Image (spheres, rainbow, N blue to C red):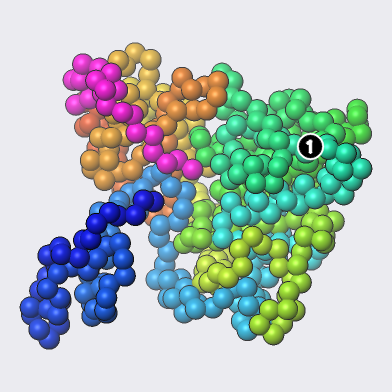
């Protein structure tokens, strides 16, 4: 970010004079500078109000239908988090009970995801799924390096197979750790990785296949079970043993409760590791993620550091070090509070809202659904071919006027012709809110029909909102 040029410490202070506490005129004649430290302190109420008022310009998180991230928790969880903000998660010697809660969460996830021996599964908390994916990718690469030491030393370049719909963190992983990304493009109405395409790109330098349980583009599950079966066949034919990592950033906390018949997890012997975001459908405020490995063999010991830190010997596998323990405590609270039946009820409610809202949008007659929210409580839709007056970017822009944040974006390579809107239904997005959204959408569509053509054709730049 460029530094602000010039001084800005002569701005008048546009703040309620009653915030001057004892003196209604306040102790400050001018506003504090924006781009350098103030010369002196100010009353806490004044500092709070200045920041609070600026943040009013942010969108309403509860109306943000672009994000997968949790935007509401119970007050009891918020209280627990406030009691743990000052606890450094990495200092397990000083805060042993926080470390114990982390260990319990890992054990609960290992059981939930059907690890063959939950006591042998290994895992850790992270700052989110992006870090968890990095760690899983590192383990895949190191396992491949150990199996192919001579070839790697001779210059063989490892590769990772995945659909082009993967979250951007996987592209970062490949760039940062020098792994060739082999991306399967979208084709026709296939918007994610399938078994045939995955196997076609595997060779002796493939460190693994990433299967996404809940694509951010449309909310669909990739067929982990079919991919694993196809890779079994590849091993029988060629001897290549390619492991699978399941990126369950969202679906890892949906499928176990709503799709119990799907064998996407450690029930598949080829699945070496799984990640999820506690702060998505794990129902915890950001940021917390989880990475789990099937057993100790799936996570090379050389990647685990044993550090003498603040008085204790501690194993750690993370890209970050110091971070608050509050999110881990909140995750344990949510596991304890809801249990399996509670999670099932919450996720089913979100799926019900998604299904009903998708059907209502389809009934408007000018939208075509790509998905219906029957996997992740997420669905994508586009404009029908006969609509010439407006596009998805016009719809997104108009919804924003009412406070709704619904992203519009184009699909990637080979389907850049397809532009969609996507709605994420999370806990806290009630049926009442969905009905209000549908009513607003119906009203604005009637107005948009009176446009001569989409605003892009008048030179208005299409705004592609953040949709990961």
| Disc 1 target residue | 157
Q: For residue 17, what is the image quadrant?
A: bottom left
| Residue that appears at 44% across and 76% down | 82
Residue ranking furthest to the left: 25
**Residue 247, horizontal then vertical, whole percent:** 64, 46
Q: Is residue 352 visible?
A: no
- Relative to 96, residue 147 above or below: above
Horizontal side, residue 341 vs residue 309: left or right: left
Q: What secondary structure is found at the residue carrying circle 1?
A: loop
**Residue 327, horizontal then vertical, whole percent:** 52, 67
Q: Decide whether the magenta segment is chiefly helix, strand or loop.
A: loop
| Residue that appears at 64% across and 66% down | 105
Horizontal side, residue 157 vs residue 87: left or right: right
- The answer to which of 204 and 433 lies nearer the viewer is 204
- The answer to which of 287 and 338 lies nearer the viewer is 287
- The answer to which of 297 and 90 lies nearer the viewer is 90
Q: Is residue 229 located in the magenta-colored stretch of the structure? A: no
| Residue that appears at 57% across and 28% down | 191
- Relative to 331, residue 281 above or below: above
Q: For residue 148, what is the image quadrant?
A: top right
| Residue that appears at 85% across and 42% down | 152
Residues in magenta, as a range: 447-468
Horizontal side, residue 238 vs residue 64: left or right: right
Q: Is residue 450 located in the magenta-colored stretch of the structure? A: yes
**Residue 356, horizontal then vertical, whole percent:** 40, 38
């Amino acid at each position: 970010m460029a530094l602000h040029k010039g001084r800005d410490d002569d701005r008048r202070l546009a703040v309620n004079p009653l915030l001057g506490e004892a003196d209604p005129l306040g102790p400050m004649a001018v506003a504090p500078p924006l781009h350098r430290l103030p010369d002196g302190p100010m009353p806490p109420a004044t500092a709070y109000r200045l920041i609070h008022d600026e943040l009013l310009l942010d969108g309403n998180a509860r109306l943000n239908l672009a994000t997968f991230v949790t935007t509401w928790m119970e007050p009891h969880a918020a209280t627990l988090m406030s009691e743990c903000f000052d606890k450094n998660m990495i200092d397990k010697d000083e805060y042993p009970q926080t470390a114990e809660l982390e260990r319990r969460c890992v054990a609960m996830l290992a059981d939930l995801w059907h690890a063959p021996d939950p006591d042998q599964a290994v895992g850790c908390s992270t700052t989110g799924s992006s870090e968890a994916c990095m760690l899983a990718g590192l383990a895949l690469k190191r396992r491949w390096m150990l199996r192919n030491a001579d070839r790697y030393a001779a210059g063989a370049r490892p590769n990772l197979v995945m659909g082009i719909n993967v979250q951007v963190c996987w592209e970062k992983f490949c760039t940062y750790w020098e792994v060739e990304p082999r991306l399967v493009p979208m084709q026709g109405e296939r918007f994610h990785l399938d078994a045939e395409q995955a196997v076609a790109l595997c060779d002796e330098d493939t460190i693994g296949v990433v299967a996404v349980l809940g694509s951010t583009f449309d909310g669909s599950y990739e067929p982990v079970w079919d991919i694993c079966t196809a890779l079994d066949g590849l091993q029988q034919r060629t001897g290549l043993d390619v492991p699978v990592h399941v990126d369950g950033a969202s679906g890892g906390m949906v499928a176990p409760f709503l799709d119990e018949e799907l064998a996407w997890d450690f029930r598949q012997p080829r699945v070496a590791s799984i990640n999820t975001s506690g702060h998505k459908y794990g129902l915890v405020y950001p940021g917390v993620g989880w990475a789990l490995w099937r057993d100790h063999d799936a996570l090379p010991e050389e990647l685990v550091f044993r550090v003498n830190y603040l008085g204790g010997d501690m194993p750690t596998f993370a890209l970050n070090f110091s971070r608050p323990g509050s999110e881990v405590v909140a995750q344990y609270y949510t596991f304890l509070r809801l249990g399996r039946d509670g999670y099932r009820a919450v996720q089913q409610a979100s799926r019900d809202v998604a299904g009903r809202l998708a059907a209502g949008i389809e009934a408007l007659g000018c939208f075509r659904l790509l998905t219906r929210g029957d996997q992740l409580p997420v669905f994508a839709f586009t404009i029908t071919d006969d609509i010439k007056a407006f596009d998805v970017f016009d719809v997104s822009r108009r919804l924003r006027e009412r406070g709704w944040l619904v992203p519009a974006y184009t699909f990637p390579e080979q389907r850049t012709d397809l532009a969609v809107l996507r709605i994420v239904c999370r806990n806290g997005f009630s049926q009442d809110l969905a009905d209000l959204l549908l009513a607003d959408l119906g009203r604005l569509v009637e107005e948009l029909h009176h446009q001569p053509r989409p605003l892009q054709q008048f030179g208005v730049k299409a705004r592609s909102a953040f949709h990961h």
